Image (cartoon, helix red, strand yellow):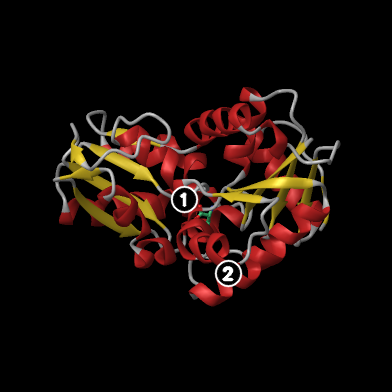
Amino acid sequence: MAVGIFDSGLGGLTVLDAARRRLPDVPFVYFGDSAHAPYGVRDADDIYNLTTAAVERLWAAGCDLVILACNTASAAALRRMQESWVPRDKRVLGVFVPLIEALTERQWGDNSPPREVAVKHVALFATPATVASRAFQRELAFRAIGVDVEAQACGGVVDAIEEGDMILAEALVRSHVDALRRKMPSPEAAILGCTHYPLLQDVFQDALGPDVSVYSQADLVAESLADYLERHPGMLGSGTDGMYLTTGDPRRVSSRATQFLRRQITFEQA
Ligand code: DGL
């Protein structure tokens, strides 16, 4: 009974950690495609091909259910995968919907018509590919009306995190927050729409100020995964061992992951 968690690199570890806390008895197989990160500057076909290859590897590791803990893959590839690629006995879920349900104060799977919600001005920080896809605005429009979304494509942040250059990553975050504020001076809420960004959540909060509620995905996705597994216990795959797979250099990736999560993490070659 294993569940797969996929990201282009290390960002999905923020989701994995929350999922492990919420579901301590479930083994998770993590796949980080560090050799091909960042995805955020790639085109949709490229992201689709890389994501499907990674998901096939997770299926081979005994995971029938795979979470795309990557907004870029969720935005650019998930719908196409679900429509024409995922076999009947497997599931691939993304990370947008739990976040949007939280923002719009909806229960899981509440499909009632869009309605007015408390927040009116939302800042979205995400990769260039996620921003270009407009997937966030599309999913939001199904659930809420009258919400003004200003999106900031945060070029360079994922590369800096993957390289372990947190000083550069912090400087880039501050400059992207400044750029957002020039377009939307007073957002009420900010969405960290990339699973790498919670590694810099304090910097986002500091740059945005205490009046802005910062939403990040890890706990929301973990909660909705727990809910999903309760309703679909058969989707726990046959795998029994948790593991960390990377397409990058396992030594380098393990050392970055250990630094980020402050516990020993050992990756093996995917
Ligand atoms: N963590 C991925 C996301 O949530 C980063 C994408 C990238 O590799 O650019 O979008």
Instruction: Kindly state the secondary structure of the residue where label 1 is placed.
Output: loop
Could you tell whether 124 is left or right of 263 in the image?
A: left
Q: Is residue 163 visible?
A: no
Q: Position of residue 233 (x, y in %)?
A: 68, 31
Image point (68%, 51%), residue name: 90
Could you tell whether 147 is left or right of 16 in the image?
A: left
Instruction: Kindly state the secondary structure of the residue where label 2 is placed.
Output: helix
The answer to whether 83 is drawn above or below residue 181 in the figure is below
Residue identified by numbered label 2: 48
Front residue of 167 and 144: 144
Front residue of 30 and 239: 239
Image point (58%, 38%), residue name: 15
> Closer to the N terminus: mark 2 or mark 1?
2
Q: Is residue 206 visible?
A: yes
The type of residue carrying mark 2 is: Tyr
The type of residue carrying mark 1 is: Cys
Q: Which of the numbered marks, if any, corresponds to residue 194?
A: 1
Could you tell whether 152 is left or right of 33 in the image?
A: left
Image point (30%, 30%), residue name: 105
Q: Position of residue 37 (x, y in %)?
A: 61, 64
